[in-house]
Image (spheres, rainbow, N blue to C red):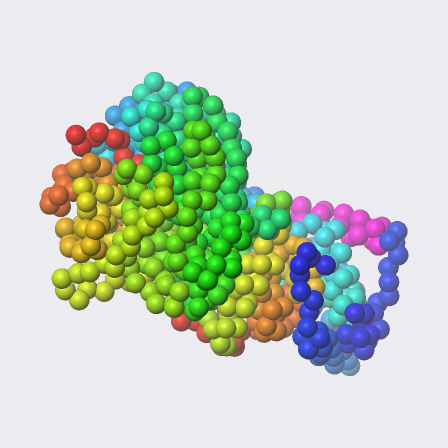
Amino acid sequence: MERNEPTMPTQQLSSRIRSIGRLAGTFTAAAVLVVASGSAAWSVPSDDAFARLLELNPGLSAVELEGSMHEAAAVTGLTYEQAITTALEEAERHAGPDGSAGAASSSNPSCGQVEIGQSRYKGDIFWASASTYGVPHGHVGIYSEKTWITEARGSGQNSGEFYYSGRKYCKKIEKMDVNTTITVQNTAADYASRYLIGKPYNSNFAWNKGGNINTLNCSELVYKAYKRSVNIDLDGDGGLGVYPSDIKNDSQTRTYQTIS
Amino acid sequence: MNALEAGGRKPSGPVRRSERNTMVKGTARRAIVVLSVAAALTGCTASDSPSDAQQLFDRAVVSDSEARLGNAVMAFFVGPQNAEMYTAVGEVRKPGYLVLVDADGSFRAVKTKRMDMMAPVWSSHGLYFADESSDYHLTASGLTKMENVKITAQNLMFALPKGGAIGIYNDGHSSGGGYSNQIGVVAQGRARLYDVQGNYFTGAICGDQVFGVTNRPGTHGSAVSKRPDMTSVADPGASPQLLTRLYSAGGGEKAVAWRPHFGGGTPAGPVPCRNNVITFLSWDTGADGREQPKVVSWNTDTGDYRAYPLSFKDAMRLDPQDFGSVVQDLRDDELHWAYADGRVFSTDIATGRTTVLFDTRLETGAGRPMQTLFAFTATQLHALSTVHGAKGDITYTVFNRTNGEVVRKVSVPIPNTGINVSYLNLSRMAVRPGDDK
C-alpha cells in the first residue's frame, strides 16, 4: 500500500470485481465458441506470440512481461496463455498510425510540434500523437490545473509539473473533458497530484489496470486518476490494458479542441 | 482478491517460485532470440539515425575547443522536451543545440546533452547555459564546461552582475511530500547545486539575489494553509501565490511573502526588478474565483505588494491563454510587454493604464500559426520567428522599442520545417548585451 493512499471504496471494489467478472465471462464464452468452431485461438501461445507482445511493449523486459501476464491471469481468472492471447489481440488493435503501443512503423520519424495551451477545466485530459524510433505509441496526460500539466519521467526520477506556456506535443492534439461535474474532475486531478506522482515509468501497456501504482505509464496515470478517485472507467474498449487512444475514444471523454 | 472471486473461473494454478523463475527465464530467452532476429530483419535500429533536421544542426556544430562568441549577436536553443525524453519506448537521449547567430544570419552551434526548455542568458561576462550534465560559460576566448549533474528540465536562468549565473531546474514532486526545484550556481569558475521547495516558472534577479513567484509552493504551503486571508472560497484547494528568495550570495532559500492570487495565471519567464521591487503582469484569480489581469509590484524586502487592474482606452479584451507567453521589461515607470498576437503594450505600473506601443505582427503561443521568441534590450525588441511547417527560413527581426521601426531583419538559414519537429523544439533566446547601445 502506498503511503497515505486511500483504500478503494467498497462500492468501487465491487464494481471492479463485477467488471472483471464480465471480462472473464466474455473470455469464457469466446473460448467456448472458438473450441466449438474448431479454432485453436486459445491454444498455447507460441514463442512468436509472446515475442510479438513484447515487441508491442517496447521498453519492457521479457521477464517483466511474463510476470505481469501471470499476475493478469491470477486477477482475471484467465489462464496465462489466454492472458497473452488477449493482451496481444488488444495490443495489435492499438498498433495503427494513431495507435498506442504500436509496432515499428514506416511513418515519418519526425513530427510537427505545437504548443498545447491551457485547458478549460482542471482535470481535463489531452491526447497527442507520439512516436519514438518509428513506434507510434501516442501520449495522454492530465491537467492538474488549467495551467499546469503533470508528466512522468524516467525510472528513479520524480514526476514533474510543467507550466503550459511553451509545452509542445506532436500534432495532432486533442483536448477533452469528462462527461461529469467540475467537482468530480477536480477530485480526479487532485488525486493525480497527490497519489500518482513521483512514480517510475511503467513500460507495460499489456496489463496496466491492476491495483499496483508503484510504477505508472501515461494512460495508466490518467485512467487510475479517474478510476480510483471517482470510479469512472475511461478504458473505452475494456481488456487488460488501457492505451492512450482508449481514453480518447471512450464515450465519456468529449473532445472540445483539436490542434492539427 | 483471487481469481474465483473475480470471475468464478478456476485460475491456471499457482506457479511455485522456482518453477516460475525457470519458466520466465526460458520464455524470456526464447523471446530475446526472436526479437533479435526480428530487429535484424526489419532494420529497427536504423530509425534511431538523425533526422534531416538534426543533420542540419549537426553540420553547424563547432567543437567545444573551437567554440567562441565571435560576432554572434543572438543565441537560441533547440532540443527535446520532457515527453520526448521519457517515452513508452523507454528513455531517449537526443542532443540539444545552442545556436549562435551573427548579424548577417549565419549561424553555428554548440552541441549539448538534454535540457527541456533550456534558457541561455547573456551578460557582459559572457553567455551562460546548461544541460543535464554540465554548466557552460562561453566567452570571446572560449568555452568553459563545468560538470554539474541535474534534472533534465529548466525553468529559468539569470546572469549575476559580477559574473556567473543562477539556473532554476524542475526537479519534481518530492517523495516525502512537497515539490522541489534545483538551484544551479555558476560562480568563479565553479558549479554547484542545491534544492529549494516550490516550482518557479516566473522569477527576477534583484542585485545579487534571485526571487521566484509561484502557486506551486511545495512544503512552504503549510505556513498559510489555515490562514483565512489566504484561502480561496471558490477553490479551497488552491494555493495563494508565494514570493521566495531562491538565491543570495550570503544566504539561501527564504519564503518572503504571500499574495491572495489563487491561480496559475502569471506569465512564465524573467520579470524586471528595480530597487528590490519586482514588477510583472498576472491574470489574477481572487478568493471569490473572479479573474482579472493586473500589473503587480512586489517588494522583495518588505513583502508588500500593489496590484492594479489593466485598463484600456477601448474595450479591448485579453485572452488568459495568450497571457502565458508574455515577455516583460521595465522602462521608467512603464512595463513594456510583448503579447501573443504580436502587439507590444505599455502599462503604467502605478495605475494599470495600458496603451499599444506598436504591432510587430509576429504571433506566438497556442493555436497560432507561428512561434516567436521575444527579448527586450535597453532600446530594442528582438524577435526570432518560425512559421509552423511553412516554406522558407526562420527570421530574426529587431525593432526600435519606442516606435516599432524595424532596425534589422535577416533570415537565418534554418528552414521552418526543420524546427519545432521531433527533438528540436525552439525554447528560449538570449541577446548580446549592449548590442543596441
Please tell me whether residue B22 belongs to the stretch shown in magenta.
yes
Measured from the top left, where is residue B206 in percent x and y? 33, 36
B195 over B311 or under it: above or below = above
Measured from the top left, where is residue B27 in percent x and y? 78, 52
* Left or right relative to A49: residue A103: left
Using the rendered image of the protein, determine whether residue A176 is visible from the camera's viewpoint.
Answer: no
Report the residue at 75% width, 56% height from top.
A66
Report the residue at 51% width, 58% height from top.
B225
B101 over A182 or under it: above or below = above
Measured from the top left, where is residue B413 in percent x and y? 27, 38
Q: Which image quadrant is residue B66 in? A: top left
B62 over B277 or under it: above or below = above
Using the rendered image of the protein, determine whether residue B10 is visible from the camera's viewpoint.
Answer: yes
* Left or right relative to A107: residue A52: right
Please tell me whether residue B8 belongs to the stretch shown in magenta.
no
Report the residue at 82% width, 74% height from top.
B4
Which residues fall within the magenta stretch? B20-39
